[in-house]
Structure formats: structure tokens, C-alpha cells
Amino acid sequence: MKIKDFFEKHNEVAVAFSGGVDSAVLLLLAKRYANRVKAYYVKSQFQPEFELKDAVEIAKLLDAEIEVMSLDVLSDKTISNNPENRCYYCKRRIFSTICNKAKDDGFSTVIDGTNASDKADDRPGMKALSELGVYSPLRICAMTKSEIRAIAKESNLPVADKPSYACLATRIKTNTPITAETLEKTEKSENILSSLGFRNYRVRYNNGSAVLELGLNDFAVFYKKRKEVYSALSKLYDEVYLNLKEREDE
């Protein structure tokens, strides 16, 4: 199926919007081919502020209506206790919020930016999407990540080269309870790395310590700015460690 055909069949759509390149291209295509479109962004403790900023900016650029909804995911112990299937419960809460609001707004079709490069066995949240009847047009139409980035570049979307970004909760080991304080430290520390010129990174939380994961090119940045990194992050964590394995996208 071609993406245009999907939107001919589903011409009024609610877009679950994250501010990443996948959902940005999905919103672009929905605006191009569908008759009625609205984007929905759910702000929880798991999303950093820059994601909301990017989402609002992209929606404005595409002249798309966007609604931002707040959700306290930490109030749900099934999520904050951080079991292995936390992602399933979290996605279920987030997308239930979107689906309910979209229904109130008169939409019967909710779509998200999952694409053909995403492996279902690595993403337990996909089960929640299936249960709630959420469509993934990019996946249905066999559009890969590289194709999506190409469309974003051709369309001059500012997130065309934005790295893949998993929520802040993924920095915390399974079965380690998730707290607002830990999430705030994670966001602050990753903002520090960004300000120092790092591009592909994660700051993992491990029993009070930070473990840095870096992409290949960021190792050179680290060795130039090691003292600055340690000085800043040691104020937030008991210890700061570097994982020598090259980081792969999530």
C-alpha cells in the first residue's frame, strides 16, 4: 500500500506526535493527503522539555493543530516500579489518553510513527498499540527509517537528522523504581552533554552512579572535555563511569 492510499482510506486522523523525525514525517504526509488532521502530544515525566519544544515547533511549521496533554505516569505503580514490561503499560496509558481525547474530538482513526525498520520483538509497546487499534501507516506502507529521513531532508524539516530518542525511563535499570528525582537528574545530565557538543549519547542510572554511553564520534569529544563532563555530572551522581562499548541507536 502507498501512503497516499492509506490516507484516502483513512482521511480523518489523529496523530500521536512525539517531535521525532518519524512522527514529524507522518504528520507531514497526513497534512498532505488527509482531509482532517490533528496532532496530540502527551507530556509526562518521561519526556524531556526539548521533545515538547520540537513537537510544537514542527506542528507550527506544518500548520497542524496540536494539543498537549499532561499525564502523571509515576502515579501508576505498575509503571513506576519499572518491571520488564513497563513500556507496555506506559504506552497503554499514553495511547489510551490520546485515543480517548481523539474520540471526543470526532476522530475514529489514531496513527503513530512506528516504521518498517522498527522490530516488533524489541518494542513491547507495539502490543499496546495493537490492542487499542492504533494504526502505524509508515510500517503498513513499508517505509524504512532511511526513507523517512530522506523525506524529512527533502521537506527541510529541522528534525531530519535528529537522533532516535527513547524516553528517560529507559536510562534506569529494570526493576529499579523510577522516581521524579532520578528522571530530573537524567534530563539535566543529558542536557549538559548536549551543551558540550555530544551528539549520540545516553546517561544511564545505576545505583546512584552515572554510566555514560557514547556513539563512536562522541568518544573524541569526551576525551577533549572529560574534566568538564566529570565536574558537571559529579554534582548529580555518586560516581561517573564511561562504558567503552560504542552506543547503538535504540
Image: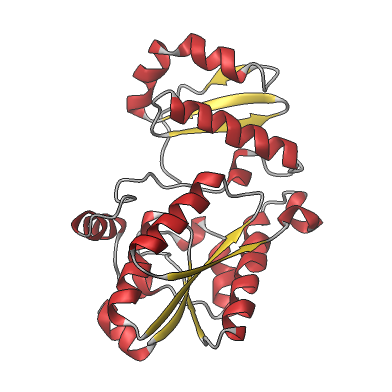
Residue 186 image-quadrant placement? top right
Q: Position of residue 139 (x, y in %)?
A: 37, 70
Residue 79 image-quadrant placement? bottom right
> Which residue sits furthest top?
227
Q: Report whether residue 1 is seen.
A: no
Is 152 placed above or below 194 here? below
Residue 151 image-quadrant placement? bottom left
Q: Position of residue 49 (x, y in %)?
A: 55, 46
Q: Residue at x 51, y 48 (%)?
A: 166
Q: How many marks?
A: 0
Is 230 placed above or below 99 here? above
Is 208 placed above or below 176 here? above
Nearest the viewer among 2 and 59 is 59
Q: Report whether residue 148 is seen.
A: yes
Q: Position of residue 122 (x, y in %)?
A: 50, 55
Q: Residue at x 50, y 45 (%)?
A: 50
Q: Residue at x 40, y 28 (%)?
A: 198
Q: Residue at x 67, y 66 (%)?
A: 93
> Which residue sits furthest left?
154
**Left or right of 249 in this view: 179:** right
Q: Quadrant of the N terminus?
A: bottom left
**Left or right of 155 in this view: 235:** right
**Left or right of 31 in this view: 102:** right
The scheme the figure's colours follow is secondary structure
Q: Position of residue 229 (x, y in %)?
A: 51, 17
